[in-house]
Amino acid sequence: MKNKLDNFIDLLAKTNLNYHDFIQKANDIDELADIIEPKNLADWRLLGLELERLDNGKIVMPTRFRDFNEQVFCIVDIETNGGIKSGQIIEIGAVKIQGGKEIDRFQTLVWASEIPQNISELTGIYQLDLVDAPHLANALESFRLFLADSVFVAHNVKFDYDFISISLAKLGFGMLLNRKICTIDLARRTIESNRYGLDALKQIFGIDNAHHRALNDAIAACEIFKECIKRVPWHVQSVEDLILFSKTAKMLKTPNVIEQINPPKTDLRG
């Protein structure tokens, strides 16, 4: 079930709000009470949500009108030493793109007191690799500055987004409010496949790099995201159009294998 904050952002994604209504609704959201001053739009931007006040006084989310080709997207991947309740981030990788072209990238290991053997075997990251790595607070502060108010994109975005957001909040930096897109959701609506895991989609598009390292996986997800973007229908124009499409458009069905081998006959007589 969505909370007040999620519902508030969903509302902003659909309509402009009268300034006084905006302030009233924002003041009613407990999660924001000790973090920002709702009247200060710069505070919202520090948490990743770009807002503007128009000449008529209304508050608008620019992603409602911005062509998605002009938007900065930040494709992110993290490696962790455990689950969201007991583990922590041990590596962050991210690629920023705009208009389909890379404009920046970010990579850091993160110090942790231990890495379970199974995690080391999966990622190739061992305790000794983290000896000189920045501590979590410093790494997340640097990442947040890099992310800024770009749209957060990831393969299974809920995991990466929530893990980073909760980690930031625990450290007193406040949660993430960035708009976000899941490449799995977007791929299901633009690419015909019977599997949508990162490895499966990498095979489809011939993406060849090591798996389970943050920057490599971010690069792979970035290439998949760009392939999805090529396939969205013409009516998807703005950033919010793209976000809505990724969540609500009809999912593609995998072509029937028998039909691919023996396609239905077509009457060509006209």
Image (cartoon, helix red, strand yellow):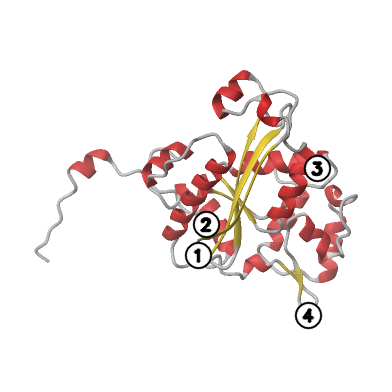
Q: Distance between the residues labelled 1 and 2?
A: 7 Å
Q: Nearer the viewer, residue 71 or 90?
A: 90
Image location of residue 263, percent across then percent down: 19, 47
Query: What residue did someone put label 4 on?
Result: 56
Query: What residue did someone put label 3 on?
Result: 169
* Relative to 235, 80 lies left or right: right
Q: How far apart are marks 1 and 4 (CA)?
A: 27 Å
Q: In this view, does 109 lie above or below 220?
A: above
Near mark 4 (Cα within 10 A), the count class, few <14, some 14-19 or many ≥20, is few
Q: Which residue lies furthest to the left in this view?
A: 269
Q: How far apart are marks 2 and 3 (CA)?
A: 29 Å
Find numbered disc 3 in the image and state the secondary structure of the residue it sits on: helix
> Which labelled disc corresponds to residue 113?
none
Q: Distance between the residues labelled 2 and 4?
A: 30 Å
Residues at circles 1 and 2 in contact by the CB criterion of under 8 Å: yes
Residues at circles 2 and 3 in contact by the CB criterion of under 8 Å: no
Please tell me which of labels 1 and 2 falls first in the chain. 1
Location of the C terminus (image quadrant): bottom left
Query: What residue did someone put label 2 on?
Result: 245
Q: Residue visible at 74% across and 49% down? A: 142
Near mark 2 (Cα within 10 A), the count class, few <14, some 14-19 or many ≥20, is many
Q: Which of 184 and 206 is in front in this view?
A: 206
Q: In the rendered image, is residue 222 in sight?
A: yes
